[in-house]
Structures are given as C-alpha cells and as structure tokens.
Image (cartoon, rainbow, N blue to C red):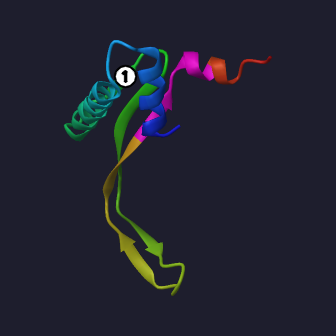
C-alpha cells in the first residue's frame, strides 16, 4: 500500500472530509511521527506496532564492485516492531 492508496481508502470511508483534507491529516500524522523519532522518542500505535531509532556503530565494509575495504560510518536507522494483535492477525489460520 502506498501513501496515495491510504489517502484514497480513508477518503472513501470518511465522507465528511475532502480528499485534500484527508491528505493534510495523513501528512501531519506522518510528519508528527517523524519529528518524534528525530527527537529520540518512540512512536507506539496500539494493536499495530511501534517505531524507534536504533544506533548502528561504524564498521569495516567492502565495496562489492571493486573489492576495496571501506569504513561505513555510524548511523541511526528506523526500526519497526509489530504489535501482538497484528502478528496474531497475520498468522491466523483460515
């Protein structure tokens, strides 16, 4: 599902708002989540999962094209952990 698909789905279910209003709401939601993660916070959506930032240390790597050893610097990466409810729904046997 893409962001456009999400906007369409919400627009079709919530007729009180225009498509443009729904787009603004979803953009605001994602921007708020991003800002929280940038500040070092955690985003938790009950029944869905949580997002947090993990720090990766610098390490030695290798350029696959040339075989040359390179240093890969430390960085922060987003990490998603699925919630219990979504895991159960994904693994539900029909």
- Give the answer, above or below, for where 55 lies relative to 63: above
* Quadrant including the C terminus: top right
Q: Residue drawn 72% across and 18% down?
A: 92
The answer to whether 70 appears left or right of 31 in the picture is right
Q: Per the image, is 18 magenta? A: no
Image side of residue 72 versus residue 39, left or right: right
Q: Nearer the viewer, residue 45 or 21?
A: 21
Residue at screen point 35% across, 27% down = 19
Say which of 64 and 3 sits in front: 3
The span picked out in magenta is: 79-87
Q: Tell which of 38 and 32 is nearer to you.
A: 32
Q: Position of residue 56 (x, y in %)?
A: 37, 53
Q: Given the current orientation, which residue lies at the most extreme top position?
A: 16
- Relative to 41, say whether 47 is above or below: above
Q: Position of residue 16 (x, y in %)?
A: 34, 12
Q: Residue at x 49, y 15 (%)?
A: 47
Q: Which residue is mark 1?
A: 44
Q: Position of residue 62 (x, y in %)?
A: 49, 76
Q: Residue furthest left?
A: 39
Q: Secondary structure at mark 1?
A: strand
Q: How many marks?
A: 1
Q: Residue at x 30, y 30 (%)?
A: 20
Residue 11: image location, x then y, percent: 41, 23
Asked where in the image residue 86 lies, by quadrant, the reply is top right
């Amino acid at each position: 599902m893409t962001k456009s698909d999400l906007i369409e789905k919400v627009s079709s279910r919530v007729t009180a708002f225009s498509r443009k209003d729904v787009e603004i709401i979803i953009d605001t939601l994602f921007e708020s989540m991003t800002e929280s993660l940038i500040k070092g916070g955690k985003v938790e959506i009950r029944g869905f999962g949580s997002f947090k930032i993990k720090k990766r240390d610098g390490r030695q790597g290798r350029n696959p094209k040339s075989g040359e050893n390179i240093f890969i610097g430390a960085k922060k990466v987003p990490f998603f952990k699925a919630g219990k409810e979504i895991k159960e729904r994904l693994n539900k046997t029909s």
